[in-house]
Amino acid sequence: VNELSFEKAPPRLKFAVTVTTGVRFFPEFFSCFQKECPNVKYTIEEMSAYDTIESIRNGRVDFAITPVVLQDEDHEDIMKIFLHTLESVICVSKDDPLSKEKVLTRKQVKDREFVTPASRNPLDFPIKITMRINQTDLIHRIVASGMAITVLPADYVKDWDDVVRLSFQEPVVNDVNIIWNKNAPHS
């Protein structure tokens, strides 16, 4: 019998990142993780921020990097460590009349068509989300063409030179945390 067949399999972790949080963590976070824990194999899956909670609870993933707001009383089984603050901006085409503004208000964007990642409304008031797409390049092209506007983290769109990034009158800020199920075994 092959001696290797009796060796213990290397530890394996499953991470989830959201379409907007992954940008900040590649490649540095996972390169450092691999350097610090060379024997741990891992997989990474992209999912919506709101799917991360259920995926943590049902064991589909071990850890998630997510901007979802966790109220402690509703998520007693979820542990978290704060990673950073994520500020979002409104992105519009350079030809859009809003591109001349310094700061945008609810009134200016409430009737506009939005393209967003496939997740819930990123603002705390109703907007017209007509497209939900996780393809970064496609969201970028849609906004640059003037078909829709978007609200995304500032660091996510920092290289989009053909769109205008505008602050919102009521800052759109989320804390990004790494979360896990405290009832699941982790060593």
Image: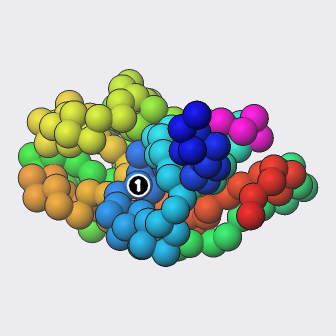
| Image position, residue 143 (x, y; %) | 21, 40
* The one of 33 and 140 positioned closer to us in this rendering: 33
Q: Main secondary structure of the magenta part?
A: loop
| Image position, residue 148 (x, y; %) | 26, 34
Q: Is residue 105 magenta?
A: no
* The one of 180 and 11 positioned closer to us in this rendering: 11
User: How are the colours assigned in the image?
Assistant: rainbow
Q: Is residue 61 left or right of residue 20?
A: right
Residue appearing at x 75%, y 35% in the figure: 58
- The residue to which callout 1 is attached is 22
Residue appearing at x 57%, y 52% in the figure: 10
* Region rendered in magenta: 57-61
Q: Amino acid at mark 1?
A: Gly
Residue appearing at x 27%, y 68% in the figure: 102
Q: Is residue 141 left or right of residue 184?
A: left
Tell me if mark 1 has few (under 14), some (14-19) or many (20+) residues whose alpha carbon lies within 10 angstroms of its own: some
* The one of 15 and 175 positioned closer to us in this rendering: 15
Look at the image and tell me whether residue 155 can be seen: yes
| Image position, residue 12 (x, y; %) | 58, 49
Mark 1 secondary-structure assignment: helix
* The one of 96 and 21 positioned closer to us in this rendering: 21
| Image position, residue 86 (x, y; %) | 47, 66
Q: Is residue 101 above or below residue 94?
A: below
Residue 111 sits in quarter: top left
The quadrant of the rendering that contains the N terminus is: top right
